Image: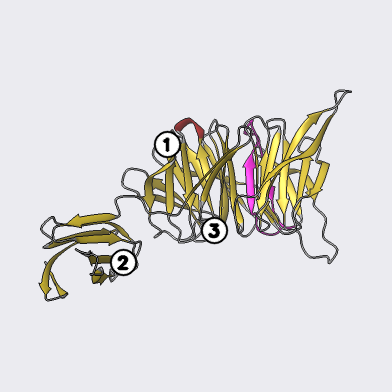
């Protein structure tokens, strides 16, 4: 999940690899939906009005917001692409891969052009962020957090996370960076770690969760950091000023919003957005106290009504045609259940007012059917 604050847009990827673009201007609603046909979606990034994704297919994909399809593919070196991040001032995109490479890609007006690779590291790169200047990149992997100099391509700091009592590897799942290069990381031990990116030193560590922390983010002021994960409790830590001018991080309010794993957090324009395995998108703030949860509904319209009490319902992978009850003694009857022969999801569907024609569309083709009724059953003649 990633926000574009200037446009009030939020892009959200789901487990079926579809991408929803939510408009946050007033009450959040789904503005566009990209059905999942381009492989997995492991990370998302905005560059102005352009949306990019990276996945296990080993490519960075730019998505066309008008046609709601994949616009172009750019392969990465090498293997799966686990994370991406955009630096708007430099007009560059960084992609972390399975084999430990950081790919730097230039974003032109209408293309993506390979620029360079940074030094290879051991193990996959699972998360990365640019700093505010665009001169450094922070990455997280197994047991290690690194700060990279983009110009030289070398790692200038390497911070070791340490391991748990059973000596299992510590996986850094998520990180975020402030303007003064304070780095927050969440790992598989349930530890939130704060680092000084200028010196490569550890500032403080909190054992905030009982299981893996999967997402970390700072608020707009960068004085509060939020974390959550397999332990779905969303915990916040605030930066406090002490009497002698020193600063200290202390635990703040926590929120119990989701019932299962929280996979992503994002702070945008004063609101905290969270989502996870329970499939709900939650918008919260405190203070003032606010909580709104949006269920996983399809982008409308999903219902089409015809004469003779007929109603067509659109689902991601099938259509249902029902005849509604005309009185209390009757029950609704399902007349048809149709599924496209291809693996593509249904983008839109409509039944004519006289209920004699049904039109539907997937990414591969448009279909038009003539409907013939035989008693209470029906059969299709394809036109």
Query: Picture quarter containing residue 380?
Result: bottom left
Labelled disc at residue 318: 2
User: Considering only vertical position in the picture, is 172 above or below 330?
Assistant: above
Picture coordinates of residue 22, whole percent (x, y)? 43, 43
Q: Quadrant of residue 176?
A: top right
Label 3 belongs to which residue?
278
Q: Secondary structure at mark 2?
A: loop
Residue name at image x 37 percent, y 54 percent: 298
Give me the disc on residue 49.
1
Check the image and name the residue furthest to the top.
244
Q: Compute the Cα span from label 3 to label 1.
A: 29 Å
Residue in the image at 32% along x and 50% along y: 300
State the separation of the CA atoms marked 3 and 2.
23 Å
Query: Which structural element holds mark 1?
Result: loop
Q: In the figure, 196 relative to 312: above or below?
A: above
**Viewed as shown, does residue 199 lie left or right of 258?**
right
Of label 3 and label 1, which has the lower sequence position? 1
| Magenta stretch, residue numbers | 122-142
């Amino acid at each position: 999940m990633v926000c574009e604050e200037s446009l009030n847009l939020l892009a959200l990827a789901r487990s079926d690899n579809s991408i929803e673009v939510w408009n946050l201007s007033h009450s959040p609603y789904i503005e566009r939906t990209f059905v999942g046909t381009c492989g997995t979606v492991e990370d998302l990034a905005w560059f102005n009005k352009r949306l990019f994704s990276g996945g296990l297919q080993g490519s960075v994909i730019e998505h066309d917001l008008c046609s709601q399809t994949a616009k172009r593919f750019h392969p990465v070196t090498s293997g799966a692409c686990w994370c991406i991040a955009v630096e708007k001032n430099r007009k560059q995109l960084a992609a972390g891969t399975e084999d430990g490479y950081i790919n730097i890609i230039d974003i032109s007006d209408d293309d993506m052009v390979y620029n360079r690779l940074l030094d290879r590291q051991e193990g996959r790169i699972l998360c990365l962020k640019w700093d505010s200047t665009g001169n450094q990149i922070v990455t997280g992997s197994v047991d290690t957090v690194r700060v990279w100099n983009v110009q030289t391509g070398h790692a200038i700091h390497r911070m070791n996370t340490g391991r748990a009592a059973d000596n299992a590897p510590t996986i850094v799942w998520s990180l975020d960076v402030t303007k003064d290069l304070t780095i927050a990381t969440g790992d598989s031990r349930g530890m939130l770690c704060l680092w000084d990116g200028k010196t490569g030193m550890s500032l403080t560590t909190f054992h905030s969760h009982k299981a893996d922390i999967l997402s970390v983010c700072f608020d707009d002021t960068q004085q509060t950091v939020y974390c959550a994960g397999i332990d779905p409790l969303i915990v916040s830590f605030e930066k406090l000023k002490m009497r002698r001018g020193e600063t200290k991080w202390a635990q703040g309010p926590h929120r119990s919003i989701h019932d299962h794993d929280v996979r992503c957090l994002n702070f945008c324009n004063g609101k905290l957005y969270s989502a996870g395995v329970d499939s709900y998108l939650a918008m919260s703030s405190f203070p003032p106290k606010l909580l709104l949860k949006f269920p996983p509904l399809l982008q409308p319209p999903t219902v089409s009504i015809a004469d003779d009490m007929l109603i067509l319902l659109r689902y991601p992978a099938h259509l249902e045609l029902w005849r509604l009850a005309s009185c209390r003694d009757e029950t609704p009857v399902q007349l048809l259940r149709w599924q496209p022969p291809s693996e593509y999801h249904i983008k839109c569907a409509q039944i004519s007012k006289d209920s004699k024609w049904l039109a539907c569309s997937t990414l591969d083709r448009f279909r038009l059917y003539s409907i013939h009724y035989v008693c209470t059953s029906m059969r299709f003649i394809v036109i």
